[in-house]
């Protein structure tokens, strides 16, 4: 029985089968259609949901029927429906094929008519030109999708790395707290043992005195049982014995006999935290890895940066791509802020601040205030018009002082406290610490001793 047009159409794309395959359940689909379905779904029939094996056998008989139908369609499409003549011409005005009889009708009078064989290549070229923006868009979307995939992978990597480092830090703190706990419990136990021993020594002395007195008392009480004449004869000696019996001073509890609980428990949390300060360090600036150029890498604690080979990391809006820069994680809009950077032994670097709106993907024309070391010279730079050479040599540590309220930024030699330069222009935008380096030896932020004077005026 001949197949109907519906029998020759794919249930997924609803067009005539292209490379039809047959599933275990005998349902037919285009190979490309069913494979596309299975990329995101289980390998089940889209019609009956029966599972299918991995192999997709072709349905040769169905393919032959489809090819016959397509040939018949092509033959029918190439004949004029009005005049039953071959369509050999193309009307540019109506943008449709016509036959010789159509050309001579009033409908196409004065129109531009060209042979299909000559016009088809031109039309193909025009269609290809119209397709080019679509193909370019597909490539752009594919690149964007790939960037999203890489970003998702990078996010997972960041998450696992952050979890690992958090666990390591807490493990170190746990170890400190466990040791602190053991030391404090040991101190209590030692004091307990010491004071218990002191009391036991005194109780032993009292026990000996009681024993000695008890023996004397027992001896005299035994004499009380003898006849009267015997008591009287021994009375003088007995009184003398009692008189010369050494009586120790009754011991009393002195001050400090009990455990000094106030020493062990008073301000316990504060004292533990105070000891913990020797374990931890505060850094006034923490670097933001999401802003770092792909050829920069940061230390695990995010306090130093150096140049490495390019890494496969997502190109996100906040990342610098034209300059080897990285920003601090927090911007400043008010208050007074200071940080020091170890810079000795570096060949090309800069430290300073940039505005939050500074150009990150192209040429930086404005929004930076920095001290540079390049080609053996130190200079301060603020684009577009400030480039001042400094008369200084061999800086090892640079201190940056930013007073947002006064609108000043100064650079000092941290070793000598000499002021190198001060920008006094009004800095109205929020400003971020900025670091640039093209070297494999790191620029490193120094820890601060003033953790009790941390300004809260941060972004």
Image: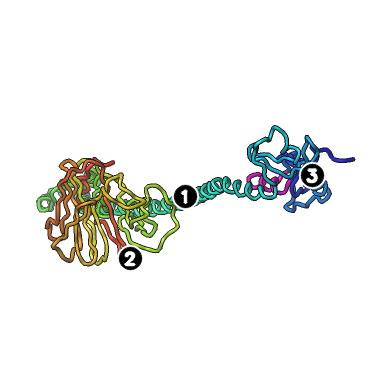
Determine the residue positioned at 72% across, 34% down: 105
Residue that badge 2 annotates: 440
Q: Is residue 407 among what the camera can see?
A: yes
| Contact flag, marks 3 and 2 (Cβ < 8 Å) | no
Residue range corresponding to the magenta coloring: 30-44
Lower sequence index among marks 3 and 1: 3
Q: Identify the disc placed on residue 323.
A: none
Residue that badge 3 annotates: 75
- Quarter occupied by residue 438: bottom left
Q: Position of residue 431 (x, y in %)?
A: 25, 45
Q: Nearer the viewer, residue 265 or 216?
A: 265
Q: Quadrant of the C terminus?
A: top left
SS of the residue at dot 3? helix
Determine the residue positioned at 82% across, 49% down: 64
Q: Position of residue 381 (x, y in %)?
A: 21, 55
Lower sequence index among marks 2 and 1: 1
Q: Is residue 296 left or right of residue 60?
A: left
Q: Is residue 111 left or right of residue 186?
A: right
Q: Nearer the viewer, residue 97 or 325?
A: 97
Q: Nearer the viewer, residue 259 or 283?
A: 283
| Contact flag, marks 3 and 1 (Cβ < 8 Å) | no
Q: Is residue 387 left or right of residue 21?
A: left
């Amino acid at each position: 029985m001949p197949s109907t047009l519906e029998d020759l159409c794919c249930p997924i794309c609803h067009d005539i089968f292209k490379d039809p395959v047959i599933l275990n359940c005998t349902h037919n689909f285009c190979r490309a259609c069913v494979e596309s379905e299975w990329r995101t779904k289980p390998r089940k029939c889209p019609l009956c949901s029966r599972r299918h094996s991995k192999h997709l056998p072709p349905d040769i008989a169905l393919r032959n029927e489809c090819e016959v139908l397509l040939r018949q369609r092509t033959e029918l499409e190439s004949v004029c429906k009005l005049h039953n003549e071959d369509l050999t011409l193309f009307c540019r005005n109506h943008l449709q094929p016509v036959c010789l009889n159509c050309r001579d009708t009033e409908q196409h009078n004065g129109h531009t008519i060209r042979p299909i064989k000559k016009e088809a290549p031109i039309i193909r070229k025009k269609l290809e030109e119209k397709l080019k923006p679509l193909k370019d868009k597909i490539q752009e979307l594919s690149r964007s999708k790939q960037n999203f995939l890489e970003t998702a992978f990078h996010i997972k990597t960041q998450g696992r790395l952050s979890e690992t480092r958090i666990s390591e830090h807490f493990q170190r703190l746990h170890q400190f707290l466990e040791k602190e706990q053991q030391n404090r419990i040991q101190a209590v136990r030692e004091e307990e043992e010491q004071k218990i021993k002191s009391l036991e020594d005194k109780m032993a002395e009292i026990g000996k005195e009681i024993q000695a007195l008890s023996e004397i008392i027992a001896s005299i009480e035994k004499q009380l049982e003898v006849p009267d004449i015997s008591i009287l004869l021994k009375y003088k000696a007995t009184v003398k014995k009692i008189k010369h019996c050494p009586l120790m001073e009754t011991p009393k509890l002195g001050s400090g006999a009990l455990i000094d609980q106030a020493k062990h428990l008073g301000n316990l949390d504060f004292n533990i935290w105070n000891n913990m300060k020797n374990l931890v360090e505060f850094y006034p600036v923490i670097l933001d890895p999401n802003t770092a150029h792909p050829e920069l890498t940061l230390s695990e604690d995010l306090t130093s940066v150096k140049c490495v080979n390019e890494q496969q990391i997502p190109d996100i809006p906040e990342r610098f791509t034209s300059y080897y820069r990285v920003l601090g994680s927090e911007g400043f809009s008010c208050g007074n802020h200071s940080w020091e950077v170890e810079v000795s032994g570096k060949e090309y670097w800069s430290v300073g601040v940039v505005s939050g709106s500074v150009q990150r993907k192209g040429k930086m024309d404005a929004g930076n205030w920095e001290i540079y070391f390049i080609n053996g010279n130190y200079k301060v730079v603020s684009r577009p018009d400030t480039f001042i050479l400094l008369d200084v040599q061999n800086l090892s540590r640079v201190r940056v002082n930013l007073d947002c309220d006064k609108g000043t930024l100064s650079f000092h030699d941290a070793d000598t406290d000499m002021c190198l330069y001060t920008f006094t222009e009004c800095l109205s935008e929020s400003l971020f610490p900025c670091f640039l380096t093209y070297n494999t030896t790191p620029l490193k932020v120094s820890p601060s001793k003033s953790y009790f004077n941390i300004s809260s005026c941060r972004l």
